[in-house]
Amino acid sequence: MGLFKRGMSKTRNSFFGRITQILGASEIDDETWEDLEAILIQSDLGAQTAIDVIEKVRERADTEAIVSFDHVLDVLKETLRDLLQEPPPLDLQGRRLSVILIVGVNGSGKTTSIAKLSNRLKSDGREVILAAADTFRAAAIEQLQTWGRRIDVPVIASEPNSDPGSVVFNATGAARARQKDTLIIDTAGRLHNNYNLMEELAKIRNVSQKTVHAAPHEVLLVLDGTTGQNALQQAKKFQEIVDVTGVIVTKLDGSAKGGMIFAIYNELNLPVHYVGLGEGIDDMIRFDPDAFVDSLFEES
């Protein structure tokens, strides 16, 4: 709870903190509900999600004759919590080699998230190997190799501008030869509206399917928490191409747009597995819906 409380301070202070001010300032009337809805939208829940939440809270308030500030706040928290679900365990069991495909646009924190995820899986006893399939940028390969050395995880790479599919093929062979049980594939930070690049991403997925049965077993989309609703538009494009199975949200500690978490569940129907709440290697933590919602309303 402590890390969530610290990490969500900007969202809490910028928007959600204003909810207590609105509810405590006057009697609850039509204007109150409009103000609450506006705050939720500004917190990047998205217009539809915000409308749905306020309608449910208002309906309960009318049905149960709720007029007190504390009771309305409790109902709001319950309604927001009901939008979220505990993330399921990653599908990494029951096979010799599990494959995780990591996707996301440049600047989302994708490579750093791969390193943090690898470190977590290592701590859980997994034998991890990485594939540097973002071959379009030499810096991306170098960054992944640097992280690999830091956390003592091997990285399979090739020359810049080489075929990403061949990197995936070689990494799969290396994983089997070295008896690794988890292959994590980095991919280029493709612009979500570039058809040709997204098609290349689909090819990487296809190579993975041909080399390992039912792979990739997880496709995790990395979203920058500071971009709010823009990140959701990216997510929808990636879903069309690669059947995203879950989300990692980065940089939440630097964002006032933490409400996007609710929109991910409500509009994308995807679980959030991990959230980034700091720069340290251990600051990407498993998403906890209860701690997350509580952190939005805690006194700073």
Image: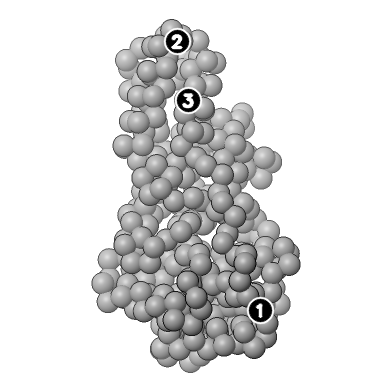
Residue at the (48%, 17%) spot, across then down: 72
Task: Name the secondary structure under disc 2.
Answer: loop
- N-terminal label among 3 and 2: 2
Q: Which mark is residue 257?
A: none
Q: Which mark is residue 180?
A: 1
Quadrant where the image shows the N terminus: top right
Q: Nearer the viewer, residue 277 or 115?
A: 115
Disc 1 packing (10 Å; few <14; some 14–19; many ≥20): some
Q: Callout 3, which amino acid?
A: Leu
Residue at the (62%, 67%) spot, across then down: 94
Disc 3 packing (10 Å; few <14; some 14–19; many ≥20): many
Q: Nearer the viewer, residue 277 or 64?
A: 64
Q: Which residue is mark 2?
A: 64
Task: Name the secondary structure under disc 1.
Answer: loop
Q: Is residue 212 left or right of residue 230?
A: right
Q: In the displayed structure, would residue 41 be above or below residue 150?
A: above
Q: Nearer the viewer, residue 183 or 196?
A: 183
Residue 50 x %, y %: 36, 33
Q: Which residue is mark 3?
A: 76
Q: Is residue 2 left or right of residue 60?
A: right
Q: CA distance from mark 2 to mark 1?
A: 57 Å
Which of labels 2 and 1 is toward the front? 1
- N-terminal label among 2 and 1: 2
Q: Callout 2, which amino acid?
A: Glu
Which of labels 3 and 2 is toward the front? 2
- N-terminal label among 1 and 3: 3
